[in-house]
Image (cartoon, coloured by chain):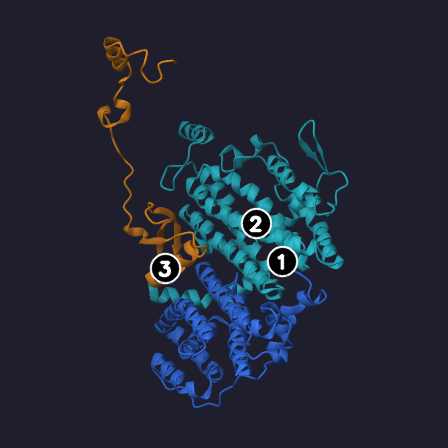
Chain colours: A blue, B cyan, C orange
Amino acid sequence: MTRDRIELLLSIADDELFLGWRNSEWTGIAPFLEEDVAFSSIAQNEIGHARALYELAAAELGTTADELAFDRKPEEYRCAPLVQLRRLEWARTIARHWLYETADEIRLAALKASDDPEIAGVAAKIDREEAYHRMHAEMWIDRLLASEEGRARLNEAMDELWPYALGVLDDELRPELRRRAQERLGRTLADVEPIPRGVHEAELAELWQEMTAVRRSAPAGSQW
Amino acid sequence: MDARTQEFLEYVQSGGQVETGDWMPDEYRSKLVKFIEMHGNSELMGVLPERDWILRAPTLQRKLALTAKIQDEVGHAQLIYRVVEDLGKPRTACLDDLVSGKAKFHNVFHYPTKTWGDVGVIAWLVDAAAIVSQKALLKCSYAPYARIMKKICWEESFHILHGRDVILAMVTGTQEQFELVQEALDRWWEPLMHFHGNPIPADEDPMFLWRIKSQGNEEARQQFLDGYVPQIRELGLEIPDPALRKDEEKGVWLYTEPDWEKLRAVVTGNGPASQERLAFRRLSREDVAWVERVVLAEAA
Amino acid sequence: MIYEVFRQERRGQPFQHAGSLTAPDTRFAEIYAREQYGRRQESVALWLVPREAVREIDDFPDEFDLKYRRVDGYSIKTRLREARERAGTLETAPGAEE
């Protein structure tokens, strides 16, 4: 039970951590300045969610959120391959953003109904903030779909990321994601093999090297 | 100078403030655009030295604080370019001039960031130097610019807190961490001394003449030294200028004369990271150019 | 499009002009304003107004110096003194020692 609980907390926390880290790569170079500020807030919120989830897991494991976020080996992270991919161009960023938020909404709905009051509570809190992320994602999807060029770029990005998106959710929740994505895009998405959690893209190890470089430069337990 | 311009000059010199729709001499308008645009450029280019470290922040707290700081800077660029835009120069034109190397940005953003120590020194001391200048702009004769400076100064105060906290954690950490800070300070001291510009007398500075700035360069530098030299020294850090000391009688800081020729070279695109930064800005702008096209196509 | 943003710092306070922003439409503007002017909890409410909806009036002629509409139109000092002298209250009046 506890094992499963920790597994669950870490997999969602790792998703939020890596997506937050990836989205923060846009800070300072987003398509326009107003968007830059907005997208940076989204990245910060995701890292905030990761921290809240790590704290729950850390309390059981007798460690800290920072140690869980930074001090594991790359192969120990449970994040879905979707969030491991490095900074993508803008259409892919928006596609990933929408796919992730939609998958997350499905996942959070299940967690909010959990018997575990701590998990249900943190899921409800995260969901309230994610509502703004979804507003932002929907706005961009509408905007891209409204022009020929935007639609073409978005569709290409969606097709490319689709097997990754399916991998965010467990088997039983995938049909719901497919239903929502197809309805939103107004077309059928390919019947593909999901790229599931547990697969480690090369980009994960590269990012891990970078995100832990400063921290590893001092002995474990040093303050920063 | 015609009578109307003379009257305008006397008006701003006596503390009068100007709004966007008011009549203003062309000379004043072009000085404003030049000054404010450079400020906007600096906020935007100031993102890049720190941006590299967003991915390397060593704790979740530092990651969040650093991202938020850079976000603020982008927000400042947004506010500032809007002011420039209302004076007649569109944001795209500012960005064109920036990436082509025609427009300038502040000297400190022409230098590379080599370690996490730099992140602390920049957030603490570069932002402290900046806040000295920006606080003086609260009294700028151009009111729309003075007004946004309130929000900017308020946000900068968070940066200084964040920077000082980063530095404190490191100087109380391992010997290597302490040395990282000292080494960063050694490299950043010269750019910091350059920051407020060469000591031309205030009344020979056209930006002061029109009361765009409300203080002279040397006055700003003295204020920075007054505020921060003691704070640096109390941490056991050494400032790499043996001549630096306060003449208590005259109440002024004495220091080794910085190389002003070097400052001129740096801000005209010959700093150690100038070209790389501009190239990066150019490239990232090209990457997202289609977004504006798509967004505006539909909005039109 | 340019939007003017007004922010309220605390409930009950007036909305004050905060600045402006550029956005493709109102939906974008709402999200951008929320982040640009509220992310540090510095506002409890924002007003978002398309710039072209703002009508500025900045001419208030007063060719014949109609002072009675202004505070400086009432110079009560001399008459008050006279009234106090008549009533014999000059010594005890507020500020009498000056």
Question: Along the horizontal axis of the image, is A168 left or right of A138?
Answer: right
Which chain does tag 1 point to?
A: B
Which chain does tag 2 point to?
A: B
Q: Residue C55: where, in percent of width, then height?
A: 27, 46
Q: Which mark is residue B10?
A: none
Disc 3 secondary structure class: helix
Q: Is residue A145 visible?
A: yes
Disc 2 secondary structure class: loop
Q: Amino acid at mark 1?
A: Gln
Question: Along the horizontal axis of the image, is B40 left or right of B300?
Answer: right
Category of crowding for the residue at label 1, using alpha-carbon neighbours closer than 10 angstroms: few (below 14), some (14–19), many (at least 20): some
Q: Residue B263: where, in percent of width, then height?
A: 66, 45
To the question of a shared chain for discs 2 and 3, the answer is no
Residue hosting label 2: B104
Disc 1 secondary structure class: helix
Residue hosting label 1: B275
Category of crowding for the residue at label 3, using alpha-carbon neighbours closer than 10 angstroms: few (below 14), some (14–19), many (at least 20): many
Q: Residue B118: where, in percent of width, then height?
A: 66, 55
Q: Residue B75: where, in percent of width, then height?
A: 47, 55
Category of crowding for the residue at label 2, using alpha-carbon neighbours closer than 10 angstroms: few (below 14), some (14–19), many (at least 20): many
For marks 1 and 2 on the same chain, the one whose residue lies earlier in the sequence = 2
